[in-house]
């Protein structure tokens, strides 16, 4: 099976940088840590080895998932319903995991949800789940897409020169400028597509009238399993973020809950997610 696009934001829980306020039992096991490692990718989605109860498996790094998800053939713990990007839902179990390790970065009493993610687990060797905000919000992350290296620390990140930074109040949303108008987009690193616009919106219709889009049919994975979607694919000349023009942005128009930018949007750059302050900071370098 060809690898399908990953889109996995969970919308039924809380928020991005403020999520930690609602999971006070979550904490890092060490007062200070700074861990740097290489990462692999599935498409452009980051894959990291994560150790739970002495067992190491491959997890996808997904800023759109508000809780960490653990693959399990059967659900256990208190049941809840999760809703995904295409508004489908599935029942998942939940638990607090005592200790989760990503290399030298150790997290304790982590809120997780569990279930059988059929359709996704077959595509990722030794698949363990998704790293969501119940872990992401407890550390700061420097993602070097050029050298495929990631840095994890619970301290303020040291920014490289020429970094553009925006403060994020709640969820991982950023403001984009397209055709001289501002739009709010989800920073969704569980998606491999650079830019996704909900079909049927005014922006989608405007883009269709100006750019050449081709129809495409394929399978994607969201909550609830694999799904065949119809979309239109094209390339925008420019998308502006914090005054920086991102050129030739691969764009999908399809049915989705919200506008989103994925890993491919930051190709050739270093991305920062700094959770060391009450307001999260998201930053990036110019293209290398």
Image (spheres, rainbow, N blue to C red):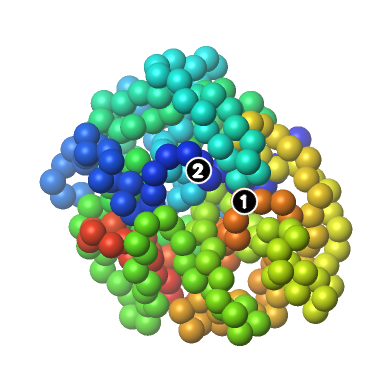
Q: Earlier in the sequence, mark 2 or mark 1?
A: 2
In what element is the residue under mark 1? loop
Mark 1 crowd level (few <14, some 14–19, many ≥20, 10 Å Cα): some
Residue sitting at x 49%, y 71%: 175
Q: Is there CB contact under 8 Å for labels 2 and 1?
A: yes
Left or right, residue 146 beside residue 192: left
* Residue 6: image location, x then y, percent: 62, 45
Q: Residue at x 51, y 76 (%)?
A: 241
Q: Position of residue 95 (x, y in %)?
A: 35, 23
Rounded to the nearest whole Å, what is the CA distance between mark 2 and mark 1?
10 Å
Whether residue 52 is situated above or below residue 176 in the rendered picture: above
Q: Which residue is mark 2?
A: 11
Tell me if 114 is positioned left or right of 137 in this view: right
Query: Relative to 257, does residue 205 appear above or below in the rendering?
Result: below
To which quarter of the image does residue 259 belong? bottom right
State the mark number for residue 257. 1
Could you tell me which secondary element the residue under label 2 belongs to? Answer: loop
The x, y position of residue 21, in whole percent, is 25, 46
């Amino acid at each position: 099976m060809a690898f399908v696009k990953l889109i996995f934001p969970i919308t039924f829980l809380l928020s991005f940088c403020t999520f930690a306020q609602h999971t006070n039992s979550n904490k890092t096991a060490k007062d200070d840590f700074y861990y740097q490692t290489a990462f692999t990718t599935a498409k452009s989605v980051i894959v990291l080895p994560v150790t739970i109860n002495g067992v190491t498996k491959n997890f996808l790094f997904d800023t759109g998932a508000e809780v960490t998800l653990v693959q399990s053939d059967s659900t256990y713990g208190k049941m809840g319903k999760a809703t995904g990007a295409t508004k489908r839902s599935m029942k998942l179990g939940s638990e607090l995991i005592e200790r989760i390790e990503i290399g030298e970065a150790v997290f304790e009493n982590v809120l997780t949800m569990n279930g059988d993610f059929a359709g996704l687990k077959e595509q990722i060797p030794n698949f363990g789940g998704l790293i969501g905000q119940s872990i992401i919000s407890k550390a700061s992350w420097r993602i070097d897409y050029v050298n495929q290296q990631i840095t994890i620390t619970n301290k303020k990140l040291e920014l490289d020169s020429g970094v553009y930074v925006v403060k994020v109040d709640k969820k991982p949303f950023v403001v984009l400028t397209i055709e001289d108008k501002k739009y709010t987009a989800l920073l969704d690193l569980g998606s491999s597509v650079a830019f996704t616009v909900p079909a049927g919106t005014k922006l989608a219709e405007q883009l269709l009238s100006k750019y050449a889009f081709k129809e495409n049919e394929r399978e994607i994975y969201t909550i609830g399993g694999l799904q065949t979607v119809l979309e239109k694919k094209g390339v925008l000349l420019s998308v502006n973020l914090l005054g920086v023009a991102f050129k030739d942005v691969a764009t999908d128009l399809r049915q989705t809950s919200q506008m989103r930018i994925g890993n491919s949007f930051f190709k050739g750059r270093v991305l920062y997610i700094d959770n060391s302050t009450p307001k999260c900071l998201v930053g990036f370098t110019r293209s290398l």
